[in-house]
Amino acid sequence: MNLLVFAGTTEGKDFVQKALSAGHFVTVSLATDYGAELLTRHLLHSPEVISSQNGLPENLHMLHGRLAREEIASLAAHFDALVDATHPYAAEVTKNLLSASSLSFVPYYRLLRASQPVMAKNLHEFENLSSLVAALAQTTGAIFLSTGSRDLAAFTAIPDYQKRLFVRVLPSQESLEKCRAANLPSDHVIAMQGVCSTALNKALFAEYDCRLLVTKESGETGGFAEKIAAAESLGMEIYALKAPVEAETLHCFSSAEELLAALAEATVRKETE
């Protein structure tokens, strides 16, 4: 099949690898150059993927940059299927992909990260970002922010945020520019690629003497449990943004293998029609 894949997660990279190995033609849309770099590195270290002379598979094409809903619909019309392997918190992107699928009459498949329920004594959960920020504004002490750079501007509403916030973001130009735009001191920015172990998280939290952790319920591949365990061992308060509840769709899968099996069945049905 000729697949258009929107991939911004570990699961997305894994699916692209397996789809290429299965012989599918894959066009991957990535929001940033850094995302493309990570995917390239992942594929170059995958022995199952057959590489061409330039090191990447011949049945792979990569697109860089964010696309509007109309652009996605126009692009999707040239493919057999639209695969949404974006982050659970990228709700607007998923909404646009569903709309594009409807407009282009191309079937939509969702690779959705499984949730990871975690219990912790000092865990406070929030349905939305505004309520979380409002709660943080009532606290004191240093805050370790591990939610990335996307919503960083919202946390500038916290009193003395420049002194209190220590943020961990991806080491990409886009992330660092958002930190500069928020006027965060450079020694309050930790630019590194996750996922971090419990020990490394604990060391970082302790190094900056943080008393509060802000995180997302990002599941196993997002390192959620490791962050919780580290914070709990240090007696930190944990403020977690709950994962958005997505509408159930007909083609929703929790693993690359399940999704590839469904695509194979769809191919057989199409050939016998």
Image (cartoon, rainbow, N blue to C red):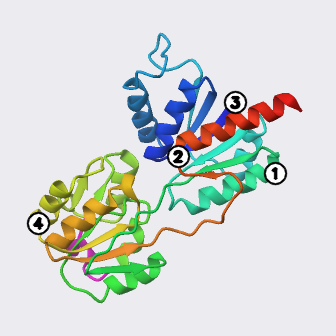
User: CB atoms at circles 4 and 2 under 8 Å apart?
Assistant: no
Q: Is residue 167 visible?
A: no
The residue singled out by tag 2 in the image is 255
x then y, percent, for residue 54: 46, 14
Give the spatial CA distance, label 4 vs label 1: 51 Å
Residue 238, image quadrant = bottom left
Residue depth check, mark 4 versus mark 2: number of the one nearer the observer:
2
> Disc 4 marks which residue?
206
Residue at position x 43%, y 45% in the image: 10
Give the answer, above or below, for where 227 lies relative to 82: below
- Looking at the rendered structure, the kind of residue marked 1 is Leu
Name the residue rendered at 78%, 39% in the picture: 77
Residue 246 x/y as whole percent: 60, 65
Give how far across and how far down residue 66 sits, in percent. 58, 47
Magenta-colored span: 158-166
- What residue is disc 1 on? 103
Q: What's the residue type where badge 2 is placed?
A: Ser
- Name the image quarter holding the N terminus: top right
Q: Mark 2 or mark 1, which is nearer the start of the sequence?
A: 1
> Looking at the rendering, in which quadrant would you find the C terminus?
top right
Which comes before the other along the chain, label 3 or label 2?
3
Disc 1 secondary structure class:
helix
Q: Which mark is residue 2?
A: 3
Relative depth, front residue between 134 and 112:
112
Mark 2: secondary structure: loop
Q: Please name the amino acid that badge 3 sits on.
A: Asn
